[in-house]
Amino acid sequence: MRQTILAVLSLSAMAALLTGCGGDMVLLNSKGPVAQGQSDLMMTAIYLMLLVVIPSAVMALWFGWKYRASNKDADYKPTWAHSTAIEIVVWGIPVIIIGILAWLTWWGSHKYDPYRPVESDKAPLTVQVIAEQFKWIFIYPEQNIATVNEIRFPEKTPVSLRLTSNFTMNSFFIPALSGQIYAMAGMQTHLNFLADETSPAEGYRGFSSNYSGYGFSQMHFRAHSVTDAQFAEWVAAVKAGNGTSVNPNAVQKTVLDHTEFAALRDGNRSKHQIEAMVVNAQTPEEKAAAEALKPYPTKPHPVTYYSSVEPKLFESVINKYMSNYHGADHSATAGHEAAASDAHANVEHATAASVEE
C-alpha cells in the first residue's frame, strides 16, 4: 500500500511539473513549429500512457481498501479463476494504446525529421556549425561571417544547420526551437528549425547535451531570433568590424582562417592537473610539454565575431577526418554531402506529406 501511494504521489508531481507548474519548463515552452510539434507529440504519448497508469493506481488503492482484512462484507470467492470481460479490458485497452503510440511514433519520426526542411514561403538561412573543444563556431557561408557561441537569425525564416565536429562527438540542442542533433567528426548532420517570434534580449539557451570532456559544461551559447531588419543590420556591422555596436559584450575580430581556428581549441586538463604534470615531469621535454598545455575553460568562451571567413573552412574540417581513410582526399565528398542530404530530406518530406493526405 505504501508503495502504491508513493507511486501516485510521484505521478501527480510529475504531471504538475510537465504542465509547467513551479517554473519554466523549456521543453513545453516552445517558440517554433518544430519544437512545438515535438512537445505536442511527447505530451500526447504521456496522456495516452496515463490512461492505463491512473486507472491502475486508482484500482490498486480501491482494491486494497475494499478487500482489507477488517471489511467483513467484501465478497470472498476463493475458487474464482477467469473473467472474459476483465481479460478484454486489461489486454484490449493497452494493445489499442500501443498501436496508437506506434503510429504516432512512425508519423512523428517523418514529420519532425531533423533533415526535413521547414515549410515556409521564405528561403532558408544556411549556417554551418562546428563543435570545437569547448565551444560552438557558427559560419554563415552566404554572408561570409562567423561567430563563436552565438547564432542570430531572422524570425519566421527557416534556418538550415549543417553540423560537424572538430573533436569528439557532441550534441547540439536549442530546447525552445528544436530537438537535439549529434555533431560528429568527418560527418555532416542537418537540423532545420524556425522561430515564430523574436527572442528575449538574452536570446534562447543553447548548449551541448552530450558529455565530451572536462570543459563540456561550458559549451553554452545563445540563439537570437530577430527581425529581418535587425539581422541585416547585425550582418553589416560584423562585416564592417563593428559587431560590438549590436552586442557590446562581444569580441570583434577580422578573419577566421585555419590559424585562428586552431587557436580556438581549449585544453582538456585542469590547472591543477597541469601543475601536477609539471612537478612530476622526468625530463625537460616532458616539463616543457606540460607547461605548454592549455587548461580547460571554467566559463564559456566570450561571444566572438569574425568579419570574414576563409573559403571552404567548414568542408576542410570534415575532410581532415575523412582523409584518414586510406589517405584519400574526400573534399568532393564533403562538398556533395549537402546535396545528398537534401535529396534524402525531399524523399522524407514526400513520404510524410503522402501520409498526412
Image (cartoon, grey):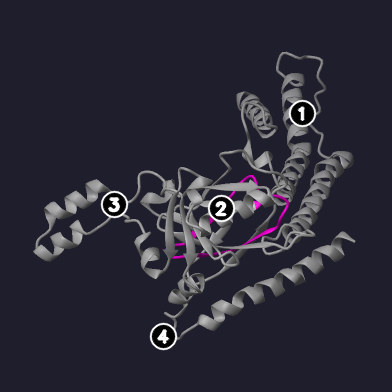
Residue 137 x, y percent position in the rendering: 48, 58
Residue 128 x, y percent position in the rendering: 56, 64
Q: Residues within 10 Å of mark 1 (few under 14, many from 20)?
A: few
* Alpha carbons under labels 1 and 4: distance apart: 66 Å
Residue 224 x, y percent position in the rendering: 60, 47
**Which of the two discs, 3 and 4, labels the residue nearer the N terminus?**
3
Q: Which residue is mark 2?
A: 151
Residue 59's tag is: 1
Q: Amino acid at mark 3?
A: Pro
Residue 295's tag is: 3
State whether residue 73 is above or below residue 284. Answer: above
Q: Which residues are magenta?
A: 154-178
Label 1 or label 4, whichever lies nearer to me, is 4
**Which of the two discs, 3 and 2, labels the residue nearer the N terminus?**
2
Q: Is residue 179 visible?
A: no
Q: Residue furthest left?
A: 283
